């Protein structure tokens, strides 16, 4: 256990600052100085973002600032005993015992379980008393080691069948005797954004309060180190449910129909007795709120005990759920397409021939283009197939965020219909919201017991698919097709005039408006269609193609620059990870690489992208940049002339967009919106 904390990570009665930011920064710097984090500033930024979402001060003079951070390389505990204490937002005053819990964003389950055990020890008076009495750093290390030494080597895997007490053996309730048994049986779920500290502290606080009051209460902590679901028989036998959570409850449909009390996880630590009393009252009240089985209920955060979450924040969390599941399709598919261009050249899919090359040739019977063309075709087809799932995955998991598993199939179908109608990712978002809402509404129907088994696998997918996809087909397809036709005709007429730079501005705006959606596709189709009539005497189509491709590269490159280099603190850990992939996606002319950013924050990302796209389009036209290749980005540099003009326009637009999105996020974004992004990403 000594590898988690050592004497150099302990501060005893030394002044670290007069406010919590100074204390967190000092502890983060200690972690970095010990080689356990690549950047003390990076760890501080992630811990401070968590602190801004919800203060980590707890009753009893304790504070547990914590974070999962890409900067952390080794799971670490840093400790400070402060004299005097510093205010961390606890209701009973300043904290004199502060633990910084630092976990890598890819931490193993065993490490997360160990850190969680430390957090649970803080609920024990003997542990905190020993820390206050410790005479030196070495003694603190011994106390902490003893507290976490009995943690099992491997954390339980999520989804494995076991009783809840097996997850939290230290706090398992002692069953009351028959004479003491309460008339109410309660089950509870606790979960926080990081799943390390508050999750288990709330579980222990509720368990202790239930034991003290003789209540039959069992808790299921859903932490980052995995969780064991309560036996369904225990849930079925319960009279009420407590959800003390900051994120969505996993497999919430297990609790469907039960009276529920919802609150933030911190209230489970500070007011466990009140939550239990409210749950008992809910069990006796026929009109009390019930668990619907839909994930949106958890996302809403609504309860009789906490202020309802704003509609904007609920929608943002739903969209981020869809984006998080869509990302592997974008990253994997986009990179495979880029590799296809690299191996097979910019003409690897000329006239959609890549698949034909694979069918008609083999490694022992190569096409005319040789091994490079064959390998490039294989990579291109696999990548294009993966990218083909992009909108369907986005739509399907948006519906999942609203209606849980019954919403997945209707959402995927609605997304596929959006692609069929050329509605792009905006159509996928609309389709997912429609499918999820309809599935959620149907799921709320109090069906007879004999029909309930068919609802999630037959009735809901059937009716929700029909409703959502029917609306897409009947009401959205025609307007989108009309809009595409009008825009295409208008651009064709404008390009024939002397306003070629203006055409570059317009095309740049269109390429960055919906990132692969119908408007983007109109601009791209307009450019590629003109290549057939291009020649040395008529270079205009080559100019248009260069402007379109260069502008389409700006959004992902700008988001990558902003989130990984210029100001990482303005972006969630998930967005920073997406930013790393967006570098290559943008270089490959995969505009969809910016979709994760746009879906999470469209009112800032899209305008900033459009501004940079307009600059790039105008400069490309003004510098007379030509592209003979319809796709490939920087990998088809040999088909672009002059390449220096292309790069200049690209760099200028990328810088404009990157600084614009940073400015908008700093000065045109509310605190609530920032917190919503951090909570959704952590979930």
Image: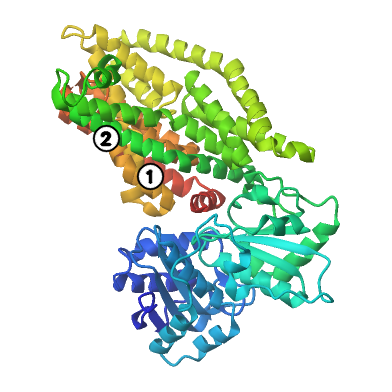
- For residue 678, which numbered disc appears in the image? none
Residue found 42% across the figure and 86% down from its top: 142
The percent coordinates of residue 115 (x first, y second) are 47, 70
Residue found 20% across the figure and 12% down from its top: 539
The percent coordinates of residue 435 (x first, y second) are 61, 31
What's the coloring here? rainbow
Pointer 1: what residue? 578
Quadrant of residue 3 within the rendered picture? bottom left
Could you classify mark 1 by the number of other residues whose Cα lies within 10 Å: few (under 14), some (14-19), or many (20 or more)? many
* Between 318 and 522, the one nearer to me in the picture: 318
Pointer 2: what residue? 587
Q: Earlier in the sequence, mark 1 or mark 2?
A: 1
The quadrant in which the N terminus is found is bottom left
Q: Secondary structure at mark 1?
A: helix
Circles 1 and 2, Cβ within 8 Å, touching? The answer is no
Give the spatial CA distance, label 1 vs label 2: 14 Å
The percent coordinates of residue 326 (x first, y second) are 45, 38
- Residue 116 lies left or right of residue 9; in this view the side is right
């Amino acid at each position: 256990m000594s590898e988690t904390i050592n004497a150099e990570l302990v501060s005893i009665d030394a002044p670290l600052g007069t406010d919590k930011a100074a204390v967190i920064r000092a502890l983060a710097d200690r972690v970095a100085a010990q080689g356990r984090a690549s950047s003390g500033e990076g760890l501080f930024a992630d811990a401070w973002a968590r602190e801004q979402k919800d203060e980590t001060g707890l009753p009893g003079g304790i504070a547990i600032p914590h974070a999962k951070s890409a900067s952390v390389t080794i799971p670490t505990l840093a400790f400070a005993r402060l004299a005097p204490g510093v205010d961390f937002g606890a209701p009973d005053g300043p904290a004199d015992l502060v633990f910084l819990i630092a976990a890598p964003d890819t931490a193993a389950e065993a490490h997360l379980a160990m850190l969680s055990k430390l957090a649970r020890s803080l609920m024990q008076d003997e542990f905190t008393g020993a820390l206050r009495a410790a005479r030196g750093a070495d003694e603190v290390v011994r106390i902490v080691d003893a507290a976490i030494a009995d943690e099992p080597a491997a954390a339980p895997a999520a989804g494995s069948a076991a009783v809840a007490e097996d997850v939290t053996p230290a706090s398992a309730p002692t069953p009351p005797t028959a004479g003491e048994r309460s008339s109410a049986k309660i089950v509870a779920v606790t979960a926080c954004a990081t799943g390390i500290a508050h999750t288990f502290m709330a579980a222990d606080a509720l368990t202790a309060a239930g034991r003290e009051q003789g209540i039959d209460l069992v808790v299921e902590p859903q932490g980052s180190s995995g969780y064991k679901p309560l036996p369904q028989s225990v849930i079925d036998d319960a009279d009420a449910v407590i959800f003390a959570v900051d994120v969505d409850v996993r497999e919430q449909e297990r609790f469907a129909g039960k009276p529920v009390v919802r609150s933030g996880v911190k209230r489970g630590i500070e007011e466990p007795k009140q939550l239990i009393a409210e749950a008992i009252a809910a069990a006796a009240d026929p009109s009390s709120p019930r668990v619907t089985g839909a994930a949106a209920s958890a996302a809403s955060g609504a309860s009789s005990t906490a202020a309802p979450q704003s509609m904007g924040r609920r929608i943002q969390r739903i969209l981020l759920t869809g984006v998080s599941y869509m990302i592997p399709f974008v990253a994997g598919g986009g990179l495979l397409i880029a590799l296809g261009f690299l191996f097979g050249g910019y003409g690897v899919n000329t006239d959609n021939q890549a698949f034909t090359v694979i069918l008609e040739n083999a490694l022992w019977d190569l096409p005319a283009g040789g091994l490079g063309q064959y390998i490039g075709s294989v990579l291109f087809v696999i990548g294009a197939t993966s990218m083909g799932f992009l909108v369907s995955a986005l739509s399907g998991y948006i519906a999942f965020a609203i209606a849980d598993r019954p919403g997945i199939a209707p959402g995927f179908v609605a997304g596929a219909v959006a692609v069929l109608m050329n509605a792009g990712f905006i159509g996928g978002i609309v389709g997912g919201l429609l499918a999820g809402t309809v599935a959620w509404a149907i799921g709320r129907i109090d069906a007879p017991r004999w029909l309930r088994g068919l609802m999630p696998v037959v009735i809901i997918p059937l009716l929700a698919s029909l409703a959502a996809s029917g609306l897409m087909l009947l009401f959205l397809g025609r307007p989108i097709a009309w809009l595409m036709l009008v825009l295409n005709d208008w651009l064709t007429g404008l390009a024939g005039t002397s306003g070629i730079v203006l055409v570059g501005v317009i095309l740049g705006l269109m390429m960055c408006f919906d990132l692969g959606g119908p408007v983007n596709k109109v601009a791209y189709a307009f450019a590629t269609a003109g290549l057939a009539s291009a020649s040395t005497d008529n270079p205009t189509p080559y100019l248009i193609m260069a402007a379109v491709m260069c502008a389409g590269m700006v959004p992902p490159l700008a988001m990558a620059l902003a989130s990984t280099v210029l100001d990482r603190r303005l972006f969630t850990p998930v967005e920073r990870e997406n930013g790393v992939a967006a570098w290559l996606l943008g270089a490959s002319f995969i505009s969809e690489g910016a979709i994760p950013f746009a879906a999470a924050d469209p009112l800032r990302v899209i305008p900033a992208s459009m501004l940079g796209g307009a600059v790039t389009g105008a400069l490309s036209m003004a510098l007379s940049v030509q592209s003979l290749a319809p796709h490939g980005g920087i990998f088809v540099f040999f088909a672009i002339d002059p390449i220096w003009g292309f790069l200049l326009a690209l760099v200028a637009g990328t810088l404009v967009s990157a600084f614009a999105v940073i400015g908008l996020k700093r000065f045109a974004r509310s605190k609530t919106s920032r917190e919503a992004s951090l909570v959704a990403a952590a979930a």
